[in-house]
Image (cartoon, grey):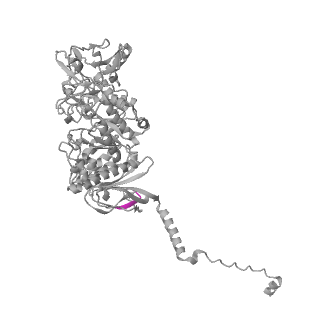
Amino acid sequence: MSIQNTHDYDVALHFFHEGSATEAYEFFGSHLCEQNGKKGAIFRVWAPHAASVSVVGDFNHWDRYQHRMKRTEHDGSVWELFIPDLKQYDIYKYSIESSMGQINLKADPYGYHMETRPNTATKLYDIGGFKWGDKKWMDDRAKKNIYDSPINIYEVHLNSWRHKHNEDELFNYMELAKELIPYVKKMGYTHIEIMPIAEFPFDGSWGYQQIGYYAPTSRFGPPHDFMQFVDYCHQNGVGLILDWVPAHFPKDAAGLYEFDGGYCYEYAEPLKREHLSWGTRVFDWGKPEVQSFLISNANYWFDKYHVDGLRVDAVASMLYLDYDRREWQRNINGGNENLEAIAFLQKLNTALFGIHPNILMIAEESTAWPMVTKPADIGGLGFNFKWNMGWMNDMISYMSMNPEYRPYHHNNLTFSFYYAFSENFILPISHDEVVYGKCSMLDKMSGPRDKRFASLRTFLTYMTAHPGKKLMFMGQEIAQFKEWNYKTGLDWDVLEFDEHKKHQHFVEALNAFYIKNKELWEADSDWSGFKWIVSDDNANSVIAFRRFDREGNELVVVCNFQPIMHEQYSFGVPFYADYEEVFTTESPEFGGTGVFNKTVKSVEEHMHGELYSITVKIAPMSAMFFKAKNIRTPEDDVRKALAKRAKEQITANPAAKKPTTAKKPTTAKKPTAAKKTADKK
């Protein structure tokens, strides 16, 4: 992009320094263009503390004296230079001289493409010109009510989902798309969420320590290839969410760390500057130029790459001044809230929803901060979804404990329902729960190994029935026994074993059941979609509840978290009807015991505040769904029974088919006058 007139400069820089720029990437960075009849590239960088800045690369033998940038006439903090005869994929860095005379080589903060690790230079790249084929998806997304739609997310780490036969060789973006997307679609997920894709030099950070905020990682190919990956997702009906990291950045020499020799992108204040446990620097969210950098970066992924959502990492670390800090300073109100971070998040979400109304902005917020998913103009943070970390912690603790202790921890199972509608929640079983000694989800289940599959099926069914959208990390759908290792692919070989193959089939069937039944997602953000039946049977660790869609259709959910068989378990239901078991974890095709309930007719017996009740068989460690059919009243059955009995009597006595016709009585004649006289005599 070439901005040549004063008005364009003034407008771009005004919004940048105001902290409200949403397209700063169109101004800063490197852009292939033509000036004065010469083809080349224009470079612009914000470096307010620098004494001098040069562009260096292979094209000038990394000599900082050949292409020295100039401060723009419009703004002394911005440096600019046009270099002719440069082309796509030429590599470069900024050679920045600090006020103390120190020289540092830095990657371009706004660079669109970067070298592949371990190299860290930026590459010239024109991201324009890609031919998108996802118009139908984008049009449908614009019209969709995402709150009343199914969202079932498959979280993926692209490096380790699947490797080629050579374990060290990665698939490229389109090879991944053609393997991953058909699998995700077959398994019944609506979205994939990719762990951070912006360029990062250290594999062990999983992408959470980035140096190329505008550059999709080159591990799998150039930027247009990633666009093709997104386009392939959309054309196959799968949404794409990216992990996004505005909370901190690493101290890599080529990154944002002390970019111009001073505290440029990070806080200058020592008590705010560091995340000591992570070894990273914290963005200065109160600085307008940093706000413009981050807000533009978030918008960039929606604008240029058509992504459907961002999951914002480590929001809790942004909100609290004392987060993971021994020393900290109170805010001007005497509290521990980071007022600058709060204002930034509100500004971010307001700006993004103003441009892209139907996107997903998801907060990974692990505390009880209020109104995370409420609009900024009423005091909320402005996100539209939040990970329910409390539910996740309670349930992993509950499922990991010996069943004999569960009656004393029944609150772990039920507490989340009391705040389930305080925010728009996503229920996550993420990568963080299956790594670094935390073991896989299968291994978290209590009991002998052969019983853990039943426990995992029950847990996943409960999760599907619980209000809130869903997220599950890759590998849990095949019941991977080992915990996740980012260095290797998933253990797909486990599918050679029958129990794992059946578990994968179970997850596929459960996801299909979720999509098919609106009761599980259409009204899962308010109380109209949920009602308890049994919440207090801690002795048996059994719960039962109802889920509704917007039209009032409902499913009845029953979960048993004890390895105990209930031959007859009764609970209240709202209708005099036939209750059909429409899904159970105990189907043999899933690895279950084959305990089924035939259609159960409710009886006129009051239970749990309902007029009727049913009695069902509940297998050990199982979950099931029931749906009412043939809803009627007891009087209907009485009338039907009487009619049936009358019909049976007629059938049994053919002679009674037509009643005998009675003779008409003889009409008496009026007595004659002679007879009257005789009678008188």
The spot of residue 316 in percent (x, y) is 26, 35
The spot of residue 470 in percent (x, y) is 32, 44
Extent of the magenta region:
609-616
Residue 370: tell me if it is visible: no
Q: Is residue 548 left or right of residue 202?
A: right
Figure disc tally: 0
Residue 33: tell me if it is visible: yes
The spot of residue 211 in percent (x, y) is 24, 28
> In which quadrant of the rendered image does the C terminus lie?
bottom right
Residue placed furthest toward the top: 73
> In which quadrant of the rendered image does the N terminus lie?
top left
Picture quadrant of residue 220:
top left
* In the image, residue 680 above or below residue 512: below
Picture quadrant of residue 110:
top left
Give the residue displayed 33% in from the left and 25% down from the top.
126
Of the pair 312 and 63, the residue shown nearer to us: 63
Q: Is residue 611 magenta?
A: yes
Picture quadrant of residue 251:
top left
* In the image, residue 493 above or below residue 572: above
Of the pair 122 and 433, the residue shown nearer to us: 122
* In the image, residue 183 above or below residue 452: above
* In the image, residue 553 above or below residue 221: below
The spot of residue 56 in percent (x, y) is 23, 19
Residue placed furthest toward the right: 674
Q: Main secondary structure of the magenta part?
A: strand
Q: Is residue 249 magenta?
A: no
Q: Is residue 133 left or right of residue 542?
A: right
